[in-house]
Image (cartoon, rainbow, N blue to C red):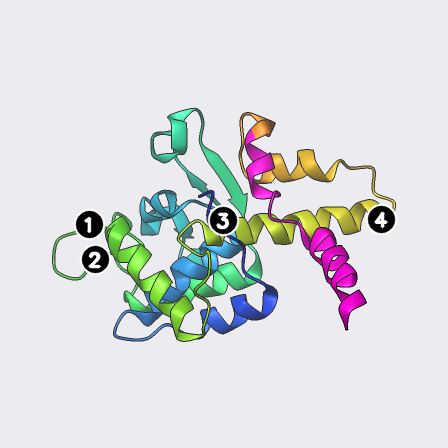
Amino acid sequence: MSGCRPLTQEETLQCSSAFQGRYHIRDKCLFVLGVLAGFRIKEMLSLRVKDVVVNKRIRNTIQVKRRFMKGKHESRSVYLAPAARSAILEQVKAMVWASPETYLFKAQGDTNKPISYERARMVLIEAMQRVGVVENVGTHTLRKTFANMMYDEFIAMRQRGEHIDPFMELSQALGHKDPKSTTHYITFRDHYRKNAIAELGGMFD
């Protein structure tokens, strides 16, 4: 996790269109859900059709059960953005509305099991590489991208007069039991330092 960085908005859009092959809908769904819901890869791989569909409609909120969460302390529920629901709908349609117990990110073959973490990592990294995103990225890049976008939104809300603490809101959005864990997700926000260094370098121009 420590070596991963978030994607920029432009990179995120480019990567979302870079998935190829027979299972490109499934793989894109994994990417979009990771970026817009902030679940860890293994948490998403635990999802079954019944977790995201009710009466042939995509749920507005999905929950990952406690036993699949990191640390297994408590479950986590996340509201789905419209784009996330659309990605899930496309995946469910591609699965021809599979049975409720079927894994959402089902592996190839007749056995009902999700793709492996290694397979998920491979398809995500390959998509990033296709659009030239190769530096300091990995599976946790999705969750860090979610954190970066959410933090920006919370800061904007605060600037508009909302009485919120952006850091604490982000901590809750990430499902962190200990807010100290959240600091690892905002250490990459060093653009002010980079801009200052760039200005200093201008003296030699």
Secondary structure state at the residue bearing disc 2: loop
**Residue for badge 1:** 113
Looking at the picture, which amino acid does disc 4 mark?
A: Gln
The mark nearer the N terminus, 2 or 1, is 2
Q: Position of residue 22 (x, y in %)?
A: 25, 74
Looking at the picture, which amino acid does disc 2 mark?
A: Ala
43 to 127, vertically: above or below: above
Distance, label 2 to label 1, CA atoms, is: 6 Å
Looking at the picture, which amino acid does disc 3 mark?
A: Arg
Secondary structure state at the residue bearing disc 3: helix
Secondary structure state at the residue bearing disc 4: helix
- Which quadrant of the figure has residue 119? bottom left
Image label count: 4
Comparing marks 2 and 4, which lies closer to the viewer? 4
Q: Position of residue 194 (x, y in %)?
A: 69, 56
The mark nearer the N terminus, 1 or 3, is 1
Which residue reaches farthest left? 110
**Residue for badge 2:** 107
**Residue for badge 4:** 159
**Residue for badge 3:** 143
Distance, label 3 to label 4, CA atoms, is: 24 Å
Span highlighted in magenta in the image: 181-205
User: Residue visible at 45% across and 45% down?
Assistant: 39
